[in-house]
Structures are given as structure tokens and as C-alpha cells.
Image (cartoon, rainbow, N blue to C red):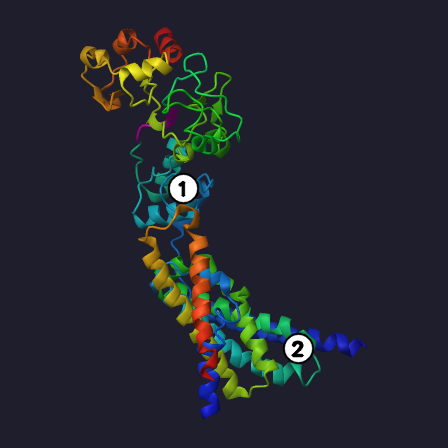
């Protein structure tokens, strides 16, 4: 039980996918203009990452390993993720058209969100069992959500701040993302 | 050897089939009823995705028209023809508005307007704007470096040999891209049917205008006093024709001491002859 909590906390804070591993930067910068859409994106990514972790674990140990096809890992995992993203897209389009509009092109881009493929591959290479895999996947996604929502809060404030014109837009966003990453480094001593 | 090849193909194929089947099933559960009018309207819209209507692209406008958020003639690019087709699909009569075109409100050709200095920089109005607002003597004048020409999706605005940009009213679709691109803010939408315009944007005092340009509005207000329809207003040292009341009598054109008010005489002559 303790090890599961450690995995969860480590995935959320210490090994935060965005701020410590620098995976999934594209949606992090793209969908972080409003807290509301950031929460929606976080929820979509959490769903995809959690489910992708579970399914890729099954695919790895039920199909790839028995048939000695470990080298097909990337393709098989991408297939799983792409199908999941399609599914999430359908669900969101049906349940919340406004969120669908707000997420825009970044929703199908979860397919190529390296954090999702990253968590699947890290799960396998770290040798986690099924339960640990799910905790790591959900934890990583929660860490992603935490980072993107905090960042969206900062960017909402930035809109009304007097920012020098040369820094306006992406430059100041990248600078503040960098400062966030440095502050998250403080969690390194946690475990 | 063959087995090594077939195994991955087989298993990945099975996985693909399972996911594909699952998605096909999910798509029937989560199917969204799209109004069939949307793709039909999208079909008759020009498809330039210029955003001139204020909606995000032609898809956005088509959805807005069907939802009733936009009038059938909301597309400024397609004009009357598109409005008619959209109205047919929607089963409405098109309440057609007057077509508008962009117009560069400056006649500061090289022969009319002085230069402050010789500009050797990048041939772009926005770049030149950084260099003391461009080399043109008049700070409100068209610099003629063609930022509008390059941004126009319809090849309707060109910098002439005289050094100012001129809109071709035939090709102009009033999408508004040049209006946003012009760093001097001197391009406006005007009714295509009207032929008399104040071709000056200078808000300077009369003497300052006269020093740099021979065809600028000097704020004498002769046109305001002489207009029989009282449809010329005056603010910020600049006369402005309220097009709604203009009858194209051309009295202002004759009275203007600097010829800042232009009429498209050729067009009016043709109308008179026919």
C-alpha cells in the first residue's frame, strides 16, 4: 500500500510529466489560456492516460511478450492510444460541445501527446505490476492536470498584467513555465 | 522466417479490428445529429476561410447561419450570389444589403506628397512604421510599401506606380484583411455604389497638411457648408461623407480647394452616358 502511494505522489509531484520530464509540452502551452479548458483537457488526458496504462499493460503482457513482439511496442501502444483518443473525442463532442470547441485541435493531438505514450513505456520499463501501472498512469495524468491548471491560472493573470511587448505571448509563458519547473524541482527531496 | 512476419501482422491486425469495431459501435451510441443544412451551406460559401464575417472560418459561419445566429447574407465575400443560394437552402428571402468595398482613404501620390527622408529599409509598411512612422511627409499617408497588397487573398489591392495602394472595387470582397494590416489605419469599407469619397485621413491642422501634401483635407469645411444634403460631417480636422445621405451631386468635389474629395468621375460619366 505504501509503495502505491509513493508511486502516485512521485508521479504527481516529483516526476511530474510536464515539469520534470518535459513530456506533453504542446497541450501544456496550447490549452492553458483558461482554467476551465485546462481542467477539461486535464480530465481528457487523465482518462486517456489511465485507460491507456491499463490497456497497454494487457497488450504488452498478453500479446507482445508471449509472441516475442516487444519490438512492436511503440506501434501497438500508439494504436491503443489513438483508439482511446477517438473514443474520448466522441464522448466529449456528445456531452460537452463547448469544451469540444475550446479544446479544438488539441483534443485529437492527445494521440501524439508524448506524455501518454511516455507513461505507457515507462510503466513497462519500470517493471510495474498491473495495479502499480494504473496508479502511475493516473498519477502522471493528475500531475499533468495539476501543472496545466496551475499554469492556466498564472496565464489568466498574465493577460491583465503589463508585460513588455517583446515578452508578450509565448515568451512570457515559457519563462513562467520554466519558473514553475524550477519550483517543482523542490519536490525532489520528498521521496 | 515467415512466422516472424505473420505473427505481428496477425496480432496487430486483430487489435486494429477490435479497436475499429469498438469505435464503430461507440460512434453509433455517441452519434450527433448534424443538421444537414450545415454541409449544404458550407458548400455554397466561398471556402476562403478569411474570417471576414466574424465567425471562425466558413464552417463556423455555416453553423451560425443554421443556428440563426447569423443572417443569410453574412458572408461579405460571396456577396449577393452566395446570399441567394444560402437563402434558398434556408428557405428564406435574402434581404440584400449594399455591397461594400475597401478603399484607401489617401491620395498622397508621390507627386502630391513630400518625403521626409529616403527609406532604405524592409519593403513593408509595418517595418517602415518603426522608422519614424515611414518616410511619407504626412504621418497619415499611404506609404505604398504593399503590406495590404501581400495580405489580400483576392488580388484586389495593388500599389500603383504613383506610390499609393489602390483597391480594385471589382475584385474586392470586403473581407477586411487589408484594413487590419494597414499600420496607418487608412483603409475603410465604403459602399460600392457610392462614387464620392474624401480621400484623406489626415487629422493634422490645415497648415500642417498643406505643408506636406497638395491634395489633403485642410479642414476648411467649405464642403460641409455647401453640401445640399447636409451629409458631410467634420471632426478631427477631417471632413467625412455620411454615405447614407449622399446623392453624388458632386458639389463638394467642385468646391474642395485642395481636391481632397474625389469622385470616381469615369464611373459617373458612364452612368450619365448610358
For the C terminus of chain B, the quadrant is top left
* Tag 1 residue: B51
| Res B198 quadrant in image | top left
Callout 2 secondary element: helix
Picture layout, residue B211 above or below residue A81: above
Q: Where is residue A38 in the image (x, y as percent from the top left)?
A: 38, 64
**Chain under disc 2:** B
Are the residues under marks 1 and 2 on the same chain? yes
**Chain under disc 1:** B
Work out whether residue A37 can be spotted.
no
Q: Which mark is residue B11?
A: 2
Q: Nearer the viewer, residue A161 or B175?
A: A161
Q: Give the range drawn in magenta.
A: B97-104
Answer whether residue B96 is magenta in the image.
no
Looking at the image, which residue is at 61% across and 81% down? Answer: A125
Looking at the image, which residue is at 45% across and 42% down? Answer: B49
Amino acid at each position: 500500500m505504501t509503495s502505491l502511494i509513493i508511486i502516485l505522489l512521485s508521479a504527481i509531484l516529483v516526476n511530474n510529466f510536464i515539469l520534470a520530464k518535459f513530456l506533453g509540452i504542446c497541450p501544456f502551452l496550447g490549452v492553458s489560456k483558461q482554467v476551465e479548458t485546462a481542467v477539461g483537457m486535464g480530465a481528457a488526458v487523465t482518462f486517456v492516460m489511465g485507460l491507456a496504462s491499463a490497456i497497454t499493460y494487457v497488450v504488452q503482457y498478453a500479446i507482445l511478450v508471449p509472441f516475442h513482439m516487444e519490438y512492436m511496442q511503440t506501434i501497438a501502444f500508439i494504436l491503443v492510444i489513438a483508439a482511446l483518443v477517438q473514443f474520448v473525442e466522441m464522448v466529449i463532442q456528445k456531452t460537452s460541445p463547448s469544451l469540444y470547441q475550446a479544446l479544438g485541435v488539441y483534443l485529437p493531438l492527445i494521440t501524439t501527446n508524448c506524455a501518454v505514450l511516455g507513461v505507457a513505456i515507462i510503466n513497462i520499463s519500470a517493471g510495474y505490476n498491473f495495479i502499480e501501472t494504473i496508479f502511475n498512469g493516473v498519477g502522471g495524468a493528475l500531475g499533468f492536470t495539476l501543472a496545466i491548471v496551475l499554469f492556466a491560472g498564472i496565464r489568466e493573470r498574465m493577460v491583465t498584467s503589463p508585460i513588455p511587448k517583446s515578452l508578450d505571448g509565448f515568451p512570457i509563458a515559457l519563462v513562467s513555465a520554466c519558473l514553475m519547473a524550477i519550483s517543482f524541482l523542490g519536490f525532489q527531496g520528498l521521496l | 522466417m515467415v512466422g516472424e512476419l505473420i505473427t505481428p501482422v496477425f496480432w496487430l491486425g486483430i487489435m486494429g479490428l477490435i479497436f475499429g469495431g469498438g469505435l464503430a459501435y461507440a460512434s453509433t451510441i455517441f452519434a450527433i445529429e448534424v443538421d444537414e443544412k450545415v454541409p449544404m451551406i458550407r458548400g455554397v460559401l466561398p471556402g476562403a476561410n478569411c474570417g471576414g464575417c466574424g465567425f471562425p472560418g466558413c464552417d463556423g459561419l455555416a453553423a451560425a447561419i443554421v443556428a440563426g445566429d447569423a443572417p443569410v447574407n453574412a458572408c461579405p465575400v460571396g456577396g449577393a450570389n452566395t446570399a441567394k443560394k444560402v437563402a434558398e437552402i434556408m428557405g428564406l428571402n435574402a434581404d440584400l444589403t449594399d455591397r461594400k468595398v475597401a478603399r484607401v482613404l489617401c491620395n498622397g501620390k508621390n507627386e502630391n506628397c513630400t518625403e521626409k527622408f529616403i527609406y532604405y529599409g524592409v519593403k513593408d509598411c509595418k517595418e517602415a512604421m518603426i522608422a519614424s512612422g515611414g518616410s511619407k511627409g504626412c504621418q497619415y499617408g499611404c506609404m505604398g510599401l504593399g503590406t495590404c497588397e501581400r495580405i489580400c487573398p483576392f488580388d484586389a489591392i495593388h500599389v500603383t506606380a504613383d506610390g499609393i495602394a489602390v483597391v480594385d472595387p471589382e475584385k474586392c470582397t470586403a473581407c477586411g484583411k487589408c484594413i487590419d494590416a494597414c499600420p496607418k489605419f487608412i483603409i475603410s469599407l465604403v459602399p460600392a455604389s457610392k462614387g464620392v469619397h474624401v480621400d484623406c485621413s489626415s487629422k493634422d491642422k490645415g497648415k500642417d497638411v498643406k505643408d506636406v501634401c497638395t491634395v489633403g483635407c485642410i479642414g476648411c469645411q467649405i464642403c460641409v457648408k455647401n453640401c445640399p444634403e447636409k451629409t458631410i460631417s467634420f471632426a478631427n480636422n477631417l471632413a467625412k461623407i455620411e454615405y447614407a445621405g449622399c446623392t453624388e451631386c458632386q458639389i463638394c468635389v467642385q468646391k474642395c480647394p485642395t481636391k481632397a474629395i474625389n469622385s470616381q468621375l469615369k464611373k459617373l460619366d458612364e452612368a450619365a452616358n448610358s
